[in-house]
Amino acid sequence: MSSRTVTGRESPEFARALEALHGARLRPEVRLTEVPAPQRIAPYAVALTADVADPRDPDDDLASGRFVLLHDPSGFAGLADRPASVEMEVRASWTPLGPEVAAHLLAWADLLCTIAGLPPLPEGVVALPGPRR
C-alpha cells in the first residue's frame, strides 16, 4: 500500500497508521485496492476501495465502498472540531484518536459486508465456502 508520503519520515504517526492498515485482517470476501487519495484535503492521505465478493460466486460483487484516511501532522483532528454528526449514504466520517487505524478499517469492512447481506463472522471463525453452482 503506497500513499502520498514518500518515506514516512515526515510524519512517523502517518507511517504507523499505514502499518496498522497493512496489518488489518479482513474477511476473505473483501478485496482491497489502493486508489488515488484526495490531493488537497490533507498533506498525507491514503484511499482504498473494497469489493465484497459473493461467497457463492466470487466473480459477483455484493457491495463496494471506499475508505479514506487523511492526516495533517498538526494532529489527527479536523472533524473533532465540528459538532457531532453522521452522514449516511452509506458515508460516515470520524476522527481517529491516533495512528492505530486498523480497527477502523475492520469496522468499515464489517459494515460493508453487512450491507452486502453477508452473515456476521465472529472473530476466530472461518467462513465455509458456499455451495457451488
Image (cartoon, rainbow, N blue to C red):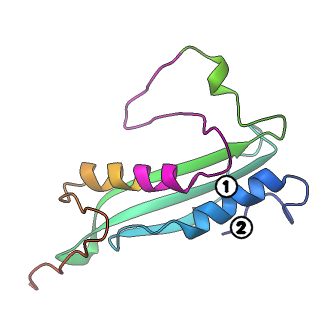
Taking the view exactly as shown, the residue that stands out farthest to the bottom is 132
User: Can you identify the residue that label 2 sits on?
Assistant: 2
Residue at x-position 21% and y-position 57%: 120
Residue 124 is situated, as x and y percent measured from the top left of the image, at 30, 70
Q: Quadrant location of the N terminus?
A: bottom right
Res 57 quadrant in image: bottom left
User: Badge 2: how crowded within 10 Å, few (<14), some, or many (20+)?
Assistant: few
Residue at x-position 67% and y-position 65%: 19
Q: Compared to 42, does 123 lie above or below?
A: below
Name the element at disc 1: strand
Q: Quadrant location of the C terminus?
A: bottom left
27 vs 7, left or right, is left
Q: Which mark is first along the chain, 2 or 1? A: 2
User: Can you identify the residue that label 1 sits on?
Assistant: 46
Name the element at disc 2: loop
CB of mark 1 within 8 Å of CB of mark 2? yes
Q: Nearer the viewer, residue 73 or 70?
A: 73
Taking the view exactly as shown, the residue that stands out farthest to the right is 10
Q: In the rendered structure, find residue 26 and report the number of the disc placed on it.
A: none
Q: Compared to 115, does 97 lie above or below?
A: above
| Image label count | 2
Which residues fall within the magenta stretch? 84-108
Residue 103 is situated, as x and y percent measured from the top left of the image, at 49, 53
Residue 105 is situated, as x and y percent measured from the top left of the image, at 49, 54
Residue flagged by tag 2: what amino acid is it?
A: Ser
Question: In the rendered structure, does residue 16 fall within the stretch colored magenta?
Answer: no
119 vs 6, left or right, is left
Residue flagged by tag 1: what amino acid is it?
A: Val
Res 119 quadrant in image: bottom left
Taking the view exactly as shown, the residue that stands out farthest to the front is 124
